[in-house]
Amino acid sequence: QVQLVESGGGSVQDGGSLRLSCKPSILTFTRYCMGWFRQAPGKEREEVASKWTGYGGANYADSVKGRFKISLDDDRTTLYLQMNSLKPEDAATYYCARSRHSTSGCNGNWYERTTTDWGQGTQVAVSS
């Protein structure tokens, strides 16, 4: 089973930037749906952004549109999340996720409709 290794979390001030990375332990060229999710204490997990490892656009939560950007490396295996203009409400544990099997895209709530592997999470703190 693949391990998703996240890195890049940390603590920044309001308005700061961070870049998260998610590298799978097994690299293949199968097309998956990958995404970033976050969960703050006392809150439910929410999808931040998702992107198919094939070609196409990405999906973003309304709360991060225009501030965050999800992307893939040239091999389309490692996932990134560039987070700009961070706000205190962005503070959470961020998780990387990937569909376990190949997909043809990332339709709504893909992580609920297909077996999904999750990373261990990386903390993001934003101080005001």
Image: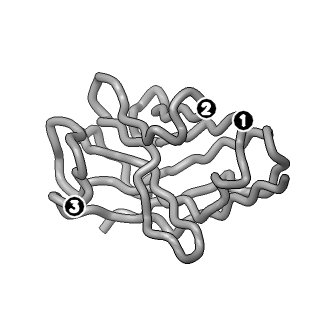
Q: Which mark is residue 85?
A: 1
Q: What residue is drawn where x is 36% and y is 35%?
A: 59
| Closer to the eye: label 3 or 1 | 1
Q: Quadrant of residue 10?
A: bottom right
How would you rate the neighbour count of disc 3 (Cα within 10 Å): few for under 14, some for 14-19, many for 20 or more? few
Q: Quadrant of residue 30?
A: top left
How would you rate the neighbour count of disc 2 (Cα within 10 Å): few for under 14, some for 14-19, many for 20 or more? few
Q: Secondary structure at mark 3?
A: helix
Residue 22, horizontal then vertical, whole percent: 51, 50
- Is 58 displayed left or right of 12 in the figure? left
Q: What residue is drawn where x is 20% and y is 36%?
A: 105
In 3D space, how far apart are the residues under numbered discs 1 and 2 (Cα atoms)?
6 Å
- Is 96 displayed left or right of 2 in the figure? right
Q: What residue is drawn where x is 20% and y is 41%?
A: 107
Disc 3 and disc 1 in contact, CB within 8 angstroms: no
* Residue position marked by numbered label 2 in the rendering: 67
Residue 75, horizontal then vertical, whole percent: 41, 31
- Is 10 displayed left or right of 100 in the figure? right
Q: Indicate whether 103 appears above or below 66.
A: below
Q: Amino acid at mark 3?
A: Glu
Disc 1 and disc 2 in contact, CB within 8 angstroms: yes
Q: Nearer the viewer, residue 35 or 42?
A: 42
* Residue position marked by numbered label 3 in the rendering: 112
Residue 13, horizontal then vertical, whole percent: 84, 48
Q: Indicate whether 26 appears above or below 56.
A: below
